[in-house]
Image (cartoon, grey):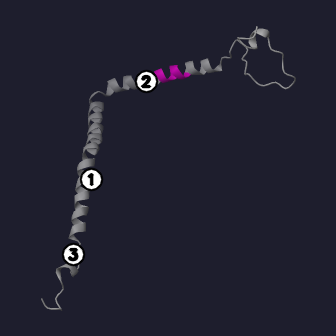
Amino acid sequence: MSPSSPSPSSRPSRGWGTLGFGAAAVAACAVCCAGPFLAVLGSIGVTSAIGTLWMPALAVLAVAAGLGILVVRRRRQTASCKTAPVRADLGMPTIGPPQPQHPRQRGAGAR
């Protein structure tokens, strides 16, 4: 070898390794993501086909679902507007001298 010719290790890289790695990554992503995309698009297509064939049945189901939502909302609204018939003890601390304890509440061993 002459001193003017470049050695095999000093030649500039063409970038095919990086390009090949990038192409492999794109291919792997396409293989990985193609299934879910096709499943979503297929389900939309099947749902559209069923909707065009059974439009009256879907309209009946939509009306029934709307009525069901109205009934549930009305029941929740009437149940939430009712007040409790008993007084609620919130357990708030009081300010003042401590109250004497009842003998039975002092302790199980002391009698």
Q: Whole-Å distance between the Cαs marked 1 and 3?
A: 25 Å
User: Disc 1 marks which amino acid?
Assistant: Cys
User: Disc 2 marks which amino acid?
Assistant: Ala
Per the image, the residue denoted by label 1 is 29
**Label 2 residue SS:** helix
Q: Is residue 54 left or right of residue 100?
A: left
Q: Is residue 3 left or right of residue 78?
A: left
Q: Is residue 47 left or right of residue 82?
A: left
Per the image, the residue denoted by label 2 is 65
* Extreme-top residue of the structure: 111
Q: Position of residue 23 (x, y in %)?
A: 23, 61
Q: Residue at x 28, y 45 (%)?
A: 37
Q: Residues within 10 Å of mark 1 (few under 14, many from 20)?
A: few
User: Disc 3 marks which amino acid?
Assistant: Arg
Considering only order in the chain, which callout, 2 or 3, is on the residue closer to the N terminus?
A: 3
In the image, is residue 85 above or below residue 59? above
Identify the disc placed on residue 14: 3
Q: Nearer the viewer, mark 3 or mark 2?
A: 3
**Label 3 residue SS:** loop
Q: Residue at x 78, y 25 (%)?
A: 93
Q: Position of residue 74 (x, y in %)?
A: 56, 20
Q: Residues within 10 Å of mark 3 (few under 14, many from 20)?
A: few
Q: Nearer the viewer, mark 1 or mark 3?
A: 3
**Tag count in the figure?**
3
**Label 1 residue SS:** helix
Q: Position of residue 101 (x, y in %)?
A: 80, 14
- Splitting the image into 4 quarters, where does residue 2 fall? bottom left
Image marks 1 and 3: residues in contact by CB distance under 8 Å: no
Q: Nearer the viewer, residue 12 or 30?
A: 12
Q: Nearer the viewer, residue 51 or 44?
A: 44
Range covered by the magenta-colored residues = 68-73
